[in-house]
Amino acid sequence: MTKILSSTFRFVLPDAPFLVDRPGPGASSVSVGPFRRWHSDRTIATAFGVPEAKIMEETLVVRDILRLTLEREKDVVGVLAFSQGACLGTALCLDQELNNGLKFAVFICPLFPAVSLGPQKDVEGAVQVPCVHVRGLSDPWKGQGVKLYEKYFVGSRASTLVEFAGAHEVPSQPSDIEKVVDEILRIWEAIG
């Protein structure tokens, strides 16, 4: 997907800062480490073995990475994220300080809820940029993607849904990739 879109967009891919011992759901079974994650919120901290006292520390580390990336890469126009990254991407879209200049978002097999990028425990609001939601029909966490959409995107501008016959994964079939790419380009042209 990024290969096809690279004629229109330049991709900036910051590394998640925290190392983990195994790949997360949806990562290829042939993936080799190091494996990384973004920060934990209170709902999944125990899955990563993160004590409550370290959650805010992780939040601030992630916020600094995003802030520095956005300052360095002045022409960031959108966010493309998968799984836990989509929770972070949603929070980025909602963050009034950091999201300056974001024009659209693409979230593939997102989880719920949006993770906080500041001291607040819960992320609130409605995303105001167009978003493409990509959902695997066999994704065991599909319900979380639905919850994310209903909480943060209902009533927002031009959010669309693309479904594909897959699980918790980035689409890999040419016809599925084409549907997602077509929707991204349609939104980009409409913004344009």
Image: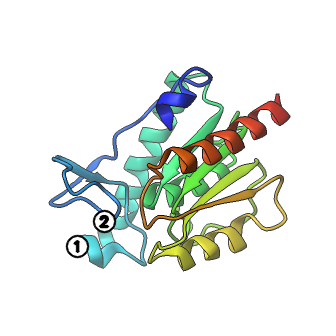
As displayed, is residue 36 above or below residue 7? below
Q: Which residue is mark 2?
A: 54
| Residue in front for this viewpoint, 190 or 78 | 190
Evaluate whether residue 98 shows in this view: no
Who's the residue at 42% across and 39% down the image?
A: 65
Q: Which residue is mark 1?
A: 49
Q: Position of residue 45 (x, y in %)?
A: 33, 73
Give the Cα distance between marks 2 and 1. 10 Å
Q: Residues within 10 Å of mark 1 (few under 14, many from 20)?
A: few
Q: Position of residue 36 (x, y in %)?
A: 27, 51
> Coloring scheme of the render?
rainbow
| Residue in front for this viewpoint, 149 or 136 | 136
Determine whether the residue tagged by mark 1 lies in a helix, strand or loop. loop
Q: Depth-wise, is mark 2 or mark 1 nearer the camera? A: 1
Who's the residue at 37% across and 55% down the image?
A: 38
Q: Position of residue 31 (x, y in %)?
A: 21, 49
The residue type indicated by label 1 comes to Gly
